[in-house]
Image: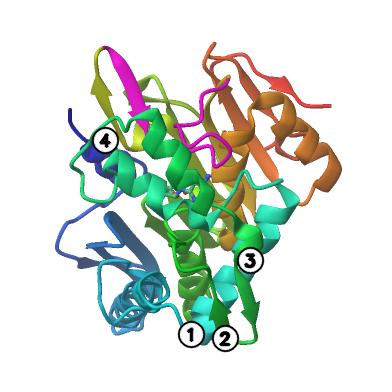
Amino acid sequence: MRINRLILIVFVCMFISGCDQNGYNKSQGSTELQTKTIFAMDTAMQFQIYTSRSDIIDLLENEIKHLDRLFDRGNSESDIYLINNTSAPITVADDTATVINTALEISSQTDGAFDISIAPIMDAWGFYTHDYVIPDTSVIDELIKNVNYHEISLNANTLCTPDNMMLDLGGIAKGFAADKLVKIIEDNDINSGIISLGGNIAAIGSKPDGSQWSVAIQDPFNSDKYIGAVSVADKAVVTSGAYQRYFESGGNIYHHIIDPHTGYPADNDIASVTIISDNGTTADALSTALFVMGMDNAADYYRKHQSFDAVFITKENEIYITPGLKNSFKSENTFSVIE
Ligand code: AMP
Ligand code: MG
């Protein structure tokens, strides 16, 4: 059994040119390229910002640390730890309230395919400790009784959950963090950069030469390859894929995206989902939810909402894109447009 974290790090480094583990500045005309790679929220994060401001990377890193302290289930001072280990209602920080509100909206729109009360199931599979195990059906049947986003109540900053419920923001926190970093970057009058928080990319403006950013989409069946790329400016590009975190046992693969209705890793025709959207928080939650829903339901969800674009790769290696990507998605493979 092993976790395949390196793939993600390599992926991030390959599509952002000039990757450097320690951070450096590289002259680009009147601005300078500021880059840094850090490890936070259990993943590699990379910043590439064009600016003359030398303190910008520190501001971004501080914000990530702040959010990690609020959301980290393992930190006894975090909001999520308190929620998971206290029976009384607790008062959470504004950032925690905002991310939970968005999570609940997406849960309701996706009929519970996205559900942050998935934590006890993640623990039972060992995804939190990385000590992987296939739980007995009876264990899953018992734990899944505590998975139900309807029972999370949030009034302003007061949060109530049933005693046995535990929350896990892993499916949405990085997208929320990306939105907050983009806000800091824009508030500092910077209009060119790209950040990558695990599978969550945010493009700020365009490249310094005015052309769009090209974000590569990994081939879910081959970590050395991409299946194509989308050209974007001012967008979040978020991918959920079974290949991002999994373990193998008895010839089967068990990955980290759980179907909250079964308690087992989502098992349908989708191999990866990439969401392209103005909003990184909803893009993150949706990439997870649509992965759980499977191709037909995900395409129906797109037809109903149309507030985002998406690239789906099926287990049969077919590629489907939404109509908004017709001019911006490039691939050597054949692909179909969802109508
Ligand atoms: P992502 O990589 O954004 O698709 O999110 C996967 C992470 O979200 C997992 O590592 C869990 O922490 C959490 N998670 C897994 N399944 C779900 C689900 N169905 N709804 C909400 N969060 C989930
Ligand atoms: Mg997600």
**Sequence-wise, which precedes: disc 1 or disc 3?**
1
- Residue closer to the observer: 6 or 53: 6
Judge whether 34 appears above or below 262 on screen.
below
Could you tell me the amino acid type at mark 3? Answer: Thr
Residue ID at (26%, 35%): 7
Q: Which residues are magenta?
A: 251-268
Residue matched to label 4: 7
Residue 330 in percent (x, y) is at 59, 29
Mark 1–mark 3 distance (CA, rounded to whole Å): 15 Å
**Sequence-wise, which precedes: disc 4 or disc 2?**
4
Residue ID at (32%, 48%): 123
The kind of secondary structure the magenta stretch mainly shows is loop
Can residue 214 be seen in this snapshot? Answer: no
Residue matched to label 1: 92
Mark 3–mark 2 distance (CA, rounded to whole Å): 15 Å
**Sequence-wise, which precedes: disc 3 or disc 4?**
4
Q: Are marks 4 and 1 in contact (CB under 8 Å)?
A: no
Judge whether 280 appears above or below 94 on screen.
above
Residue matched to label 3: 102
Q: Is residue 82 left or right of residue 160?
A: left
Residue matched to label 2: 158
Residue ID at (54%, 44%): 288
Check if residue 240 falls in the magenta segment.
no
